Amino acid sequence: MAARDDEGRRGAPVPSGRLARLGRMARLAGGIAGGVLAEGGRQLVRGNLPRARDLVLTPANARRLAGQLATLRGAAMKLGQLLSMDSGDLLPPELAAILARLRADAEAMPRAQLEAVLHEAWGKDWQRLFADFGWQPVAAASIGQVHRATTLDGRQLALKIQYPGVARSIDSDVDNVAALLRLTRLLPAGIDVGPLLTEAKRQLRAEADYLREAEHLQRFGALLAGDPGFVMPEVDTALTRRRVLAMSFLPGRPLEGMDVAAQAVRDRIAELLFRLLFREIFEFRLVQTDPNFANYRYQDAARRIALLDFGATRRYSLRIVAGYRTLFRGALERDRARLLAGAHAIGYFPRDLDPRYREALLDLFELASEPLLAGSRYDFAGSDLPARLRDAALALGFEGGYRHNPPADAVFLHRKLGGMYLLAARLGARVDLARLVEPHL
């Protein structure tokens, strides 16, 4: 095999043992506490009486938190990404901004650690499987990194290789990150994130099983067969393992770089993704819930989107889908009673909810429905809707005192929908959402 020795940057080892990862968390907590004391001393010398929250949310502590979670990778980094979504309503904007740094690429693991993972997956003679293997990853994220390789018969593959220790550290990582956020008062005391953390563990365990992801990839390939708007990698079942996903390599341009394309192209990309989302909810009842922009590539010549990641795929029940159908119909018809019925069916809030909170939540649903009611193409670039949604949710939760957690299915689906709003805004796209969702209602 002609292995390309293009290591590039050296990378940082992934702490794979529980004690090593716990030690990193302890040092991080100590560093943040030290930063609080130092900043408090500086403020007192200047004659200021700072708030505790202001002492924690300093640029230095932001760097400590994001840097260590990125070094740990795995569930620690993934949880930070989950909590950082701009469409979420659980965290104050200061913390969301800190954790948003985790959406950038992670550091790659060093070559020696990578070789150990591949040895475990394919045996000591694994290099004989390939005519060429690129040591430098083409992408590095929270759970694994991606390498290109060429098979002996000339096929180009993308190999998604999981960091060592990630799967077995999920529960402890999630618990440790939550404890850290509470200890440092980065997480508001009044918010019960227990149900979300439980669901995050379940979701992350599923994402760490690449055999499961391969099944979802093949399922979506069958569901979208014949749709000219999308293309998916083909799974190489002979090389795929629980911690290594082997699939055909698909070229394409990152969607984040498509903001300079012609308006018609940007509109088409956003329309394709919204159309796919509505099919996932109402037709497939199978939703890829991760809105990370890196999950997509655009192929100019074929005018289609390559779908690359299916780890965060969730199945939705007929009851939940029927609830969302009622919710969307209520939004389109400006019918608050139907909105309320849909929210109850989804389990978004209890039937004995205080009328003040019920009306405030319905106001929030109506605000989120703004793109559906545009009457034509909604200009996402010219709208500050994500910021207004965040501010309204924070006002309800932090000032209004509303503390009910929505069901996990709703959290993950709203995360995806919010991510699509943000992607459409980044592209400067204009989309007629009502026309796309109407056939499903």
Image (tube, helix red, strand yellow):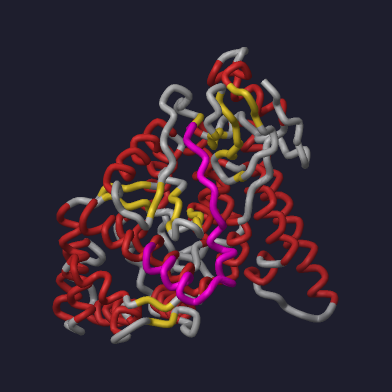
- How many discs appear? 0
* Residue placed most toward the observer, 138 or 232: 232
Q: Is residue 407 above or below residue 359?
A: above
Question: Is 158 within the magenta?
Answer: no
Task: Give coordinates of residue 396: x percent, y percent.
Answer: 39, 77
Residue at 70 percent across and 26 percent down: it is 3
Q: Is residue 419 above or below residue 202?
A: below
Question: Is 265 within the magenta?
Answer: yes
Residue at 51 percent across and 30 percent down: it is 244
* Residue placed most toward the observer, 253 or 209: 253
Side (left or right) of 378 relative to 142: left
Q: Is residue 231 above or below residue 98?
A: above
Residue 401 can be seen in this image? yes
Side (left or right) of 159 relative to 277: right
* Residue placed most toward the observer, 187 or 239: 239
Residue at 50 percent across and 68 percent down: it is 86
Q: Which residues are magenta?
A: 245-273
Side (left or right) of 220 relative to 323: right
